[in-house]
Amino acid sequence: MFQGLVALCLAGCATAPPTPTQPAPEAAATQPAAPAPEAPEARTTPAPEPVKEAAPASEKKEPARPWADEVLYFVVVDRFADGDPSNNEKGDVKAAGTFHGGDLKGLTAKLEELSSLGVTALWVTPLLKQIPGFVTGSGFPDWGYHGYWADDFQALDPRFGTEEDFKALVDAAHARGIRVLLDVVYNHPGYNSRYLKDHPDWLRSEDKGTCGSDDLTSCVAGLPDFKTERPEVAKYLLDAQIDWAKRSGVDGFRLDTVKHVSHDFWKEHRRRTRAEISPDFFLLGELWGGDVEGLAPYFTPDEMDAGFDFAFQGNALGFVQGRGRAVAFDRYLQSRAKVTPGHHLSHFLSSHDVDGALHQLQGNVPLFRLAATLQLTTSGIPVIYYGEEVGRAGGDWPQNRGDMPWGKQAVKPGAGKKRDEALRDYYKRLIAIRRAHPALSRGTHSPLSTEGDVYVFQRRDEASGDTVVVAVNRAKTKGAVSVPWPEAWTGVGEVEDLLNGGRTKAGATLDLALPPLSARILGRVP
């Protein structure tokens, strides 16, 4: 199961045929082969490259916000919005593994969908030119629509758009106060990539029997493995991705497959991005299965700014479904405060690599609302996976990469797909509350009540004096709890329910009544 999930992380669970082919209904299915456990080649530290002078960049309107305050929205570009039908790949757009037509022009045209939701940062899947055909290791034709199977690090894939389209997206996002993170992959190219022929000595591969058995030298999911320990390979990859950042004006990278690339590489990567792009260039790493402890070896030497907390989804969904006591969930939330100072955890409920939260909850929207409430009232950088805010259930791979639902809007490929607008409105309220209250993004966490099914905690930001109390009732029956009136609210006459409306007068205790499967978020009246 774990190896299967790792393969999903690399966007396909597929083993390449001898040569990429064009789609055919009778394409034979093959099972992915396990990497051959050969002795790994010795790794050496790449010599630091001289820093190049950054190319002149156009002025951009970068939001002056700490990254702790961002709400990140993740888009699989091919599945979001089709703005240019002329660049579409011919094929069955209803098939799970084909290109569906989403592109940069479409995403740019629908940025209002993001800004009206309240999100402040956008993460897009890789945009490099992909392998030309498909693979069949998953039992169906599977193309590089997701962007993780690069064939040329010097070119963008025309099915996503042009360099001008990319720059236009970044500029339009900045004009709306939205930062942009570009997903980049250093560990591997795509199956049967041209690099196997053009630079065979740059790669380990199953065909050659040169794949190792450890994290750094294995050919994950059967993909060719770049020898990033070789200075010329590291330089080529770094030059290419840094150049795209400078030309596009993106604000940072989301780093794929972090644990499959050495610390030496990431240290050089940090040095060069800061020197050649910006000292504030943001790096968000995907350490598969990462949490506050697993990320520490990357945070302590400051190789990146943030990393994904894979533990949040399971803990949050387990709690709202009644698995385990509230005190155990609270201990988990408190443990997240141990993150290396100056660094961030980023937490998600759904992604392109795991079964979607709403699907895991069997479509139970009230429970999903509780999970979203917890996500947007706890520390870290929350990630909203495209469409989950309108009820796209996700499902297991490949259903977790379905089309963005657009309902009655004539936006392909998801035109006609049902949207839950009430759920989206709930998300809008949560995001607005988070953005208005620094206690929720930067504050400390204190439990107020962890008995029974009504869980109450306090968030407090000393710098601003902001204090917020969050109460969640996971039971199918009404709940009530009384906690001491928060000391931070001493002298406050009444507080407001920021989520549902209504006010509560000050007293010796804060008395909370909650309907079944509901939440309350209380803060000071302005």
Image (cartoon, rainbow, N blue to C red):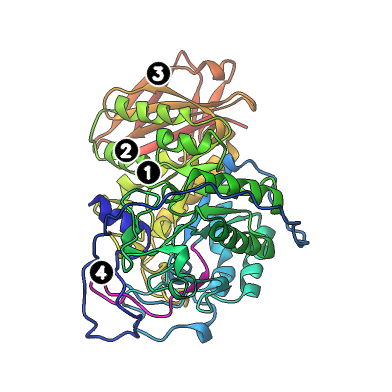
Give the residue displayed 33% in from the left and 30% down from the top: 329
Q: Disc 3 marks which amino acid?
A: Val
- Do tag 4 and tag 3 residues touch (Cβ < 8 Å)? no
The numbered mark, 1 or 4, whose residue comes first in the sequence reads 4
Of labels 1 and 3, the one closer to you? 1
Cα separation, mark 1 vs mark 2, equals 9 Å
Rendering quarter of residue 76? bottom left
Instruction: Give yes or no for residue 133 being in the magenta stretch.
Output: yes
| Dot 3 crowding, Cα within 10 Å, few <14, some 14–19, many 20+ | few
Give the residue displayed 36% in from the left and 52% down from the top: 40
| Dot 2 crowding, Cα within 10 Å, few <14, some 14–19, many 20+ | some
Q: Which residue is mark 4?
A: 138
Give the residue displayed 42% in from the left and 49% down from the top: 42
Task: Label 3, secondary structure: give it.
Answer: strand
Q: Which residue is mark 3?
A: 483
Residue 127 drawn above or below residue 396: below
